[in-house]
Image (cartoon, rainbow, N blue to C red):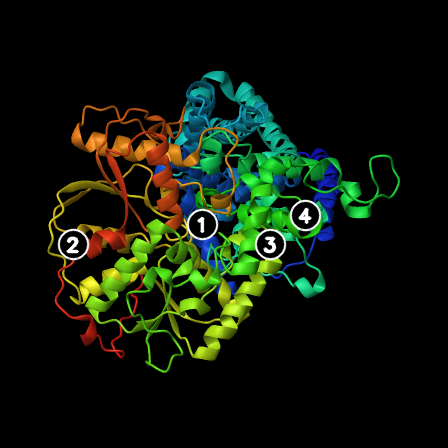
Amino acid sequence: MSPIITGLLLAVALSVFVMTMAGRAGVLLAMKGENRLDNIPFRAMQLLRFGLGQKRMVDPEEFTPGLMHIFIYAAFMVLAVRTLMLFAMGFSTTALEVLTNLSDPFWAGQPLLLGLYKVYLLVKDVVATLAVLGVAYFVFFRAKVKPDRVTPSWEAYLILGFIGALMVTEFLFGGSHMVAQDGGFVWWEPTTSVFGLGMFALGPTAAHVVGLAGFWIHLTIILAFLNFLPLGKHFHIITGLPNVFFQRTHANGKLGTPNLEKEEFGTATVKDLTWKQGLDLYSCTECGRCQTHCPTYITGKPLTHKGVNQDLKHWIWDHERWVEEGYGPNGVKEALPEIVGSALKAETVWACTSCGWCETACPVFIENIPRLIDMRRYQVQVKAEFPPEIQRVFEGIERQGNPWGLGQDRRDEWAEDLALPTWGDGGGPYEYLFFVGCAGSYDDKQKKVSRALVKILREAGVSFATLSKQEVCNGESARRMGNEYLYQTMAKTNVETWNGLGVKAVITQCPHCFNTIKNEYPEFGGDYRVINHTQLINDLLNEKRIKLSQVMNSKLTYHDPCYLGRHNGVYDAPREVLKAIPGLEVVEMQRSKREGFCCGAGGGRMWMEEHIGTRINHNRINEVALTLQHATDASTPYPDATDKKKPGQVGDYKEKGGTGVVAVACPFCSTMLKDAVNDTGREENIQVKDITELVADAMEIRRSPATVSPSATVSPKPE
């Protein structure tokens, strides 16, 4: 070939690439530092499974597109070696002869190496053929299917054209050498052989010209592609694998703990983002998977995580010098603008329910929620700009230890006739602290759940006590609404109290309490064994410490709480409990388990008004009604929740049909779904019941409360 042309192409392309990447890397270096080199074995395993193994690409809701993407990804990985070979051929005629002619004397003394090379060529041909299939699929997918989650883009067609051309030029180049060598079909290059056989009709000279053109076009596309990557959404080809490696190693539901003494008050400008949060932006593939079950997107709120990623990324790219060196658009040094008000709108930052779907669906593990919470922290703690209705929530937690602001002296009114033991009153020892929670103590509906749980615990002989009037809010809502100072105050107070009392294990009936105490309190020295009430009840049933004998002839569907399911992986225990209740016909909603749809209350949204779009809880209760109706009458249309054109259609059901129970395991979910039942006029048809209430109603009473042993224990089993 031509060393001069090859060298010039490489020199120009790599020079431009280095200059572009210098700007991209400079921005990351200007951002805050963060240690992401802990737990290397875990990170390496995740990289193998989800990076190199592409495990998330074939999640059920997007299996076919994911498989086609894997075809293209595999071709890139395998053809990376081939690309190096092609550049070697461009510089060396010897390399060209050896690598294209397997009859060359070089191979005569290398039978093992020749065999390995043939196997590589076979793999190369197969994956390149599958990549062409993948390209054709995605052209059809974008042009004809036009899925809702995919934004129309000329860039996508350009890249698909690049990929397809790379594969075809590889076949043409190989086929031309088969013509030159007067070869026929060979097993180690099946597709290339087909191209070669077809090129025989051109004659040796024309076939050589076509092959030569294919070679130079291939190299040119490779280098053009390389320089195009840092300019658009396909930057993830470079940054995706590192982003998977640098993913968080702790529970999804755990937020980072800023050092308030060092005035870490949240994210104001893009330089307050960490380098990993910047890498997240670079790695967004714009696939839109984060939208499929996103409650804000489905109900018309001004938030899509794909949109946030793109808005922030392009703002940074448009102002690289400003971020790196402090020089603004006018060429003079000036302070960076705050993110809220420049790159993002305030309503976007406050819309998120922190349900976690976006992070569950993302194939490159982008961490969206912590970034938004950090922005809220700045808005609350520095700017004092936040939805006005949450001011009373902050004041209620600060003054009375609960978000309603009800009197602390009323904390134990729900149990005034139950004669419950109080931790530290001289009784015990007790196995568990029953952390009742604010809703369980003050909300009239949730008080019934608290009493039902006490009934179950006593019947099972579980050793427990409460804190009575000493109990205060764990601070979860304050933290997710950005008031980190208030959260840390509550967390430190609780940990100090509990540790002083010798608490070792905690029962919760609220997934938000469960997540906070289990995953976030250890940061403050609160290392407890935490069990959710559904896990505990399931263990009690398995150990035959309670018996369910009352028959309930009803249809029921279960709503997964985000902070129990997606954030902590507790899916099976609630369902096993429900299936143990005699007579219940349990039917699943389409959006369930990892694909469960949020009630709309998470991320502090429980305390904020919904002014934009349709209400999230209405969408969910519509699905509940449709599920129950379809279970009764299979002829009722049941659209696909992941429909490519219009995801979430199951939440559009407006009819009054559908009779039965929706079971919940969270006080927030209970409130939101009960409100939705009333708002949509379904009070006569649908009941909202906590699993605890259902179990207590079905339970056979076999022991007197006086027989409960304070030493009785039960241990949670992993899901």
For this view, does 548 lie left or right of residue 232? left
Numbered label attached to residue 85? none
- Tell me the residue at 70%/47% (across/down): 383
For the residues marked 3 and 2, what is the alpha-carbon distance in whole angstroms?
42 Å
* Mark nearer the viewer, 1 or 4: 4
User: In the image, residue 446 lies at what x, y percent?
Assistant: 34, 52
Q: Quadrant of the N terminus?
A: top right
Tell which of 668 and 256 is nearer to you: 668
Per the image, the residue denoted by label 3 is 483
Pointer 2: what residue?
Answer: 698
Q: Amino acid at mark 1?
A: Phe
**Helix, strand or loop status at disc 3:** loop
Residue 57 visible in this rendered orientation of the protein: yes
For marks 1 and 3, give the CA distance. Answer: 34 Å
Out of 668 and 536, give the one closest to the viewer: 668
Instruction: Give the x, y percent position of residue 176.
Output: 51, 27
Query: Looking at the image, which residue is at 60% across and 57% down?
Result: 484
Please give the label number shown on residue 50. Answer: 1
Nearer the N terminus, badge 1 or badge 3? Answer: 1
Residue at 16% x, 54% y is 698
Q: Earlier in the sequence, mark 3 or mark 2?
A: 3
Pair 1/3: label in front: 3
Q: In this orientation, does residue 719 appear?
A: no
Please tell me how crowded label 2 is: few (under 14), some (14-19), or many (20+) other residues with Cα within 10 Å.
some
Mark 3 neighbour class, 10 Å CA radius: few under 14, some 14 to 19, many 20 or more: many
The residue tagged 4 is 384
CA gap, disc 1 and disc 2: 43 Å
The quadrant the C terminus occupies is: bottom left
